[in-house]
């Protein structure tokens, strides 16, 4: 998913837009995790990027997505860019 989310709408309040965005992100992650894994992979891992726009985006961890969406709401941004790409993950031997 590579998408620029808008936080402005003439009829919908910002808090509802934020909740809808979080729901869409969670739904995407859940859908990607349901896909069949390659034979040698242990789990689905995700490469995530967040920023005001695509060119200024920086790498973030999957667990920080909600935190960055909340920060966008607090900063009263008009829009933000979020990229989530699935890749096979491999556990490290101890």
Image: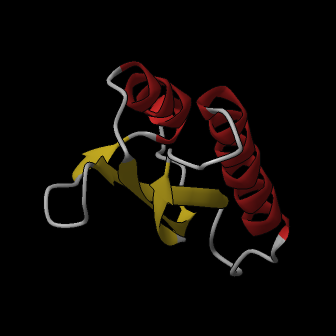
41 versus 62 height, above or below: below
Name, please, the residue furthest toward the front.
Answer: 10
From the viewer's perspective, tell me whether residue 76 is left or right of residue 62.
left
Residue at the spot 25% in from the left edge and 49% down from the top edge: 52
Give the camera-side residue of 4 and 47.
4
From the viewer's perspective, tell me whether residue 51 is left or right of residue 20.
left
Residue 13 picture location, percent across and down = 66, 33
Residue at the spot 14% in from the left edge and 56% down from the top edge: 56
Residue 19 sits in which quadrant? Answer: top right
Give the camera-side residue of 51 and 62.
51
Residue 87 picture location, percent across and down = 52, 70
Name, please, the residue furthest toward the top.
Answer: 74
Give the camera-side residue of 28 and 22.
22
Residue 38 sits in which quadrant? Answer: bottom right
Residue 53 picture location, percent across and down = 25, 59
Residue at the spot 55% in from the left edge and 30% down from the top edge: 66
């Amino acid at each position: 998913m590579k998408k620029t989310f808008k936080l402005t709408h003439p009829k919908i309040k910002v808090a509802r837009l934020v909740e809808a965005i979080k729901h869409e992100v969670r739904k995407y992650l859940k859908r990607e995790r349901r896909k069949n894994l390659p034979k040698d992979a242990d789990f689905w891992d995700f490469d995530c990027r967040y920023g005001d726009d695509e060119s200024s985006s920086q790498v973030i961890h999957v667990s920080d997505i909600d935190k960055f969406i909340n920060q966008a709401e607090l900063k009263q941004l008009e829009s933000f860019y979020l990229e989530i790409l699935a890749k096979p993950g491999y556990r490290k031997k101890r």
